Image (cartoon, helix red, strand yellow):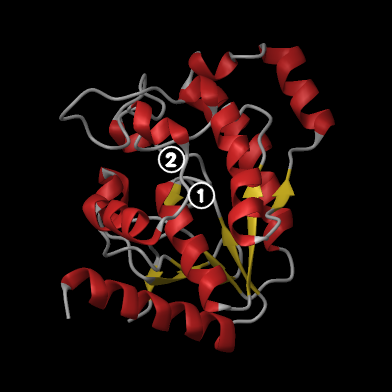
Amino acid sequence: MSDLSKLITDTRATLSRIASDFSPAVFASSLAAEDMVLTDLILKGGYDIGIFSLETGRLHKETLAMLDKVKEHYGYDITLYKPQPAAVNAYVTLNGLNAFYDSIELRKECCRIRKVEPLGRALMGKKAWVTGQRRAQAATRGSLMVEEDDPGHFMTKFNPLADWSEEDVWHYIRENGVPYNALHDQGFPSIGCEPCTRAIEPGEDVRAGRWWWENPESKECGLHVVDGKLIRIKSVA
């Protein structure tokens, strides 16, 4: 068995355990490459894990186009969660539309309104949630585990692709004909909101294009943070 074959087998086993032992569980998809691998594995495997995405109101048109691609390819409608309009309007009125460039605090507040609060609604009533995070993605994710305790949401969090490399992800996508975001072919290995994401140069870290004006240590939006710290409090063996 090749290394990728073993990764796929192990990931399927993780997804099966999530579906059987942690129902109801949901997968938070950013519609990027890693998350399309998980989407393919979940839907083709028939695992009882719902899939949702956070529609922040600032996504690229190429990212939004993925919703139709998933519908066409798999016959599946991804559930969308959007920020509260009143909170968005209050932030923009007080600070300006693109105030997130001005300070880390204002950037994180924008992320809280557009991503963290909607995520809380998406996870309400669930026993576990799934992400496409990988250790190789960033300095902030070096200690990532496949299964973790998430004290911020009082549930278990799974990162089934934690051990996968960038090459593993793309090999799977090409071998299995998985649809993917067109931005990946334009130098965007990591994709977030349009004003906070740029293409990267050869040799740069895969997340260098996310919040490129900040230090690498601060490049998280808050989805995986509790009390200012990444959720790595209790890893489950």
Task: Identify which amino acid the numbered label 1 is placed on.
Answer: Asp
From this view, report whether residue 32 is shown above or below residue 199. below
Q: Earlier in the sequence, mark 1 or mark 2?
A: 2
Residue placed at 37% from the left, 74% from the top?
A: 11
Instruction: Kindly identify which numbered label has been placed on residue 227.
Output: 1
Q: Residue furthest right?
A: 86
Q: Residues within 10 Å of mark 2 (few under 14, many from 20)?
A: some
Residue 112 visible in the current orientation: no
SS under mark 2: loop
> Quadrant of residue 66 in the image?
top right
Front-lying residue, 185 or 229: 185
The alpha-carbon separation of the residues under discs 1 and 2 comes to 13 Å
Q: Position of residue 148 (x, y in %)?
A: 42, 71
> Quadrant of residue 219 in the image?
top left
Quadrant into which the C terminus falls? bottom left
Instruction: Kindly identify which numbered label has been placed on residue 220.
Output: 2
Q: Residue furthest bottom?
A: 20
SS under mark 1: loop
Q: Position of residue 204 (x, y in %)?
A: 20, 29
Residue placed at 40% from the left, 30% from the top?
A: 210
